[in-house]
Structures are given as structure tokens and as C-alpha cells.
Image (cartoon, rainbow, N blue to C red):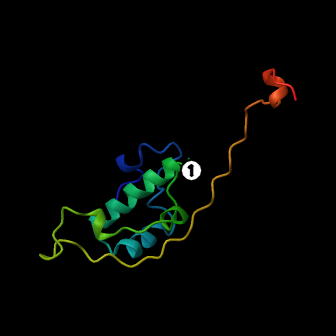
Amino acid sequence: MADSGSCCDPLLNGTKGMLTGGDMPEYLFHRTGGVVGVLEKLIQHGCRRAIEDKSERLTKELFNQFTVTSGDMPDLDAESGEQPKIPPHKPTPGKKKPKGRNTVFDDGPAAAGKTG
């Protein structure tokens, strides 16, 4: 596993060692059963989620928000044993995004030239 390699290049807050520092390697191994294809899908989902929620960083909390399923690997034949066993994981809800401010200036009907 490379330090913040090409998988994390699109993340603005990606840092060297983001996936290899601390207890992240053990976490990733636990989540993927050590299967490289499952790890790849987990990181792909994580990057997408990190971009969508604007955190731009891969963390255990972010990874915990979703599950990799066999449906993520449709090109692998389950009957022939190509699809790996994916460790079960119950997703935890992510932090809700704060609502943006309403920046529209509206004084109501009077401002539009309409009077009561």
C-alpha cells in the first residue's frame, strides 16, 4: 500500500501516510480481510465520499459510513470463487453537512413593487 498514492491524488487534504500511519493499516486489513480488490473498492468509495462531503481526507470515521459489497465487483464471478469474502460491516451515519446560509436578499412583496 503506497503512501497517499494515485488513489488519493484528487483529495485536497490528502497527506503522506494517510493510509499507512497509526492504526490505519490494521483497520484497513480488518475491513477488507486483506483482499486487495476489496481494499481498492473501499478506497475508491472513500475518495468519492471525501470529495462529496468536502472533507477531502480519508479517515476511519469516513470509511465507517459505507460498506463494500459483492455488487461493487460485478465483473467477478461469484460461482467460480472469483469474488472474495468481504468482512461484514454495519455502516455508521456520517456527520450531517451544515446547511448553507441563505444569501438571497428578499424584502417580500413590497420590494417587488407589489403592495397590499
Q: Is residue 15 visible?
A: no
**Element on which disc 1 rests:** loop
Question: Circle 1 sits on which residue?
Answer: 55
Q: Which amino acid type corresponds to the residue marked 1 in the rendered image?
A: Ser
- Residue 62 is situated, as x and y percent measured from the top left of the image, at 52, 61
Query: What residue appears at the point 57 percent right and 63 percent down from the top-left corner?
Result: 94
Query: What residue appears at the point 81 percent right and 31 percent down from the top-left corner?
Result: 108
Disc 1 packing (10 Å; few <14; some 14–19; many ≥20): some
Q: Nearer the viewer, residue 109 or 7?
A: 109
- What is the residue that sits farthest to the top in this orientation? 113
- Residue 15 is situated, as x and y percent measured from the top left of the image, at 50, 49
Q: Nearer the viewer, residue 101 or 47?
A: 101
Q: Is residue 16 visible?
A: yes
- What is the residue that sits farthest to the front in this orientation? 116
Which quadrant of the figure contains the C terminus? top right
The quadrant holding residue 28 is bottom left
- Residue 19 is situated, as x and y percent measured from the top left of the image, at 44, 59
